[in-house]
Amino acid sequence: MNAAFDLSVDNVVFGFDGEQLQVLLIRQGLPGVDMAPDRFHMAVPGDLVFPEEGLDQAAHRILSNLTSLDGIYLKQFRAFGAPDRVFEEKDREWLTRIRPHPERRVVTIGYYSLVAMADYTPRPSSFASRAEWCPLSDLPRLAFDHNDIVKAGLLQLREDVARESVIFELLPEKFTLGQLQRLHEIILDKDLDKRNFRKNVKRMEGVVPLDEKQEGVLHKPAQLYTYVRPQ
């Protein structure tokens, strides 16, 4: 029995547009290949790890190569190694076109990334013909087991938000408490009492009120806040 397998990294990139949590997807593309929307699945950015690379190094390289995103938050959360990760003909065809050993089993390390969408513009490159944001609530059928990877990434983000300050990676430099509460509610998948939430925010280390209010809004402008990471 051949025990050889490949190691890869898949990045679940979450972004927040002020209303919805979004996931960055790529459309696989190759020169001279018909890449009609129904030919291959959309996917989260991922690729094989080079023999000389560490996992974190590979995660940064792959994200930069496929989407041109650099310097964003990344966290490893889980390995995925089921023997049936490739179970649709579209995905098998894709592997035969891009992998030197398409028959090999692939074990992937999942990372999630957090992006303040206003600060970054993804640009496709390498074998990604497109890079686009998709609402988490409206994800299509993705390549391989990427839907499961996204779900697992969200569960890990949910755990981390409850005990860490990672949520501020998704917000612009200046934000309202309404945006902060909305983001918490989306990630935690539950409604939060406004009064209690704001009491808790006042106890959050690093949340600083600014002498500024929103501009260009139709409703009453809300006060702006920023987050200063504690030393």
Image (cartoon, rainbow, N blue to C red):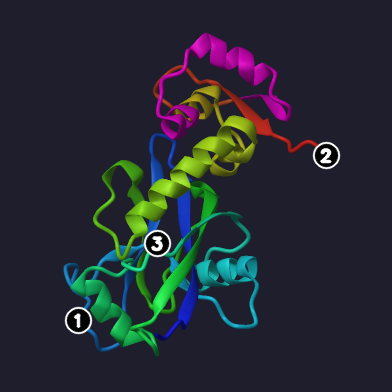
Residue drawn at (30%, 65%) of the image: 143
Magenta span of residues: 183-212
Look at label 2 and name its amino acid. Gln
Label 1 SS: loop
Residue position for label 3: 44
The residue lying toward the viewer, choosing from 80 and 16, is 80
Q: Which amino acid type is shown beneath numbered disc 3?
A: Val
Report the amino acid beneath label 1: Asp
* Residue 116 percent coordinates (x, y): 53, 46
> In the rendered structure, which disc, 1 or 3, sits on the residue that comes first in sequence?
1
Question: Residue at image x 52%, y 66%?
Answer: 63
Query: Circle 1: is it few (<14), some (14-19), or many (20+) Cα within 10 Å?
Result: few
Q: Quick check: marks 1 and 2 in contact, CB under 8 Å?
A: no
Residue that carries the numbered disc 2 in the rendered image: 231
Q: Upstream in the sequence, badge 2 or badge 3?
A: 3
The residue carrying mark 1 is 34
Residue 77 can be seen in this image: yes
Query: Which quarter of the rendering shows the N terminus?
Result: bottom left
Kindly indicate the quadrant of the structure image that contains residue 31.
Answer: bottom left
Q: Does 176 appear in magenta? A: no
